[in-house]
Image (tube, rainbow, N blue to C red):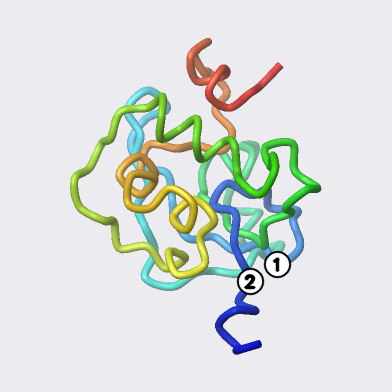
Amino acid sequence: MSKDSKKQIDCPSSQATDEGARIFGVITGTPEQHRVGYLTETVPISEQVLALAGDAKPTELFRIAAPCAGGGCKHFKGNTCSLAKRIVEGVPAVVNALPACEIRPTCRWFRQEGKAACFRCPQVMTDKSNASDFEKQIADID
């Protein structure tokens, strides 16, 4: 087996507490009109970085990647991420060029859905305190 075939697959919508978590983007704008600003290098999660979030959840301010949990995640059905599929099928694209993303080579969503996932990714917030009913449905939040 080649080294590349053993490459880790990352979830681009992870929690700060997930093992191997690192920030690859920062949420800019307002909660209603936000976009991800992609970093030129990922930043490992540390106590100092988490302190920057203040009272907010880190996932309200940062896009965080960590190794995909596969079958250990509620969104993983069969061999695919159902969240990525719901985003691509239900959310309109917000860009028409691939964002400069550091995790694309290992991103579960990109590997599964291709550039269609990337065209929607800049609007994704892992946790959004004022999520609409539509956003909750896409995210499969009970």
**In the rendered view, does 18 fall on the left or right side of 13?**
right
Indicate whether 39 appears above or below 125.
below
Which label sits on residue 40?
none
Task: Give yes or no for contact between labels 2 and 1 (Cβ–Cβ under 8 Å).
Answer: yes
Position of the N terminus, as image quadrant, is bottom right
* Residue 104 shown left or right of residue 54 in the figure: left
Provide the secondary structure element on which disc 2 rests.
loop
**SS category of the residue bearing label 1:** loop
Q: Position of residue 76 (x, y in %)?
A: 69, 42
Residue that badge 2 annotates: 8
On the image, numbered disc 1 is attached to which residue?
20
Quarter occupied by the C terminus: top right
> Which amino acid is tagged 2?
Gln
Q: Residue at x 76, y 63 (%)?
A: 19
Real-space Cα distance between discs 2 and 1? Answer: 11 Å
Residue at 61%, 69% in the rendered image: 44
The answer to which of marks 2 and 1 sits earlier in the sequence is 2
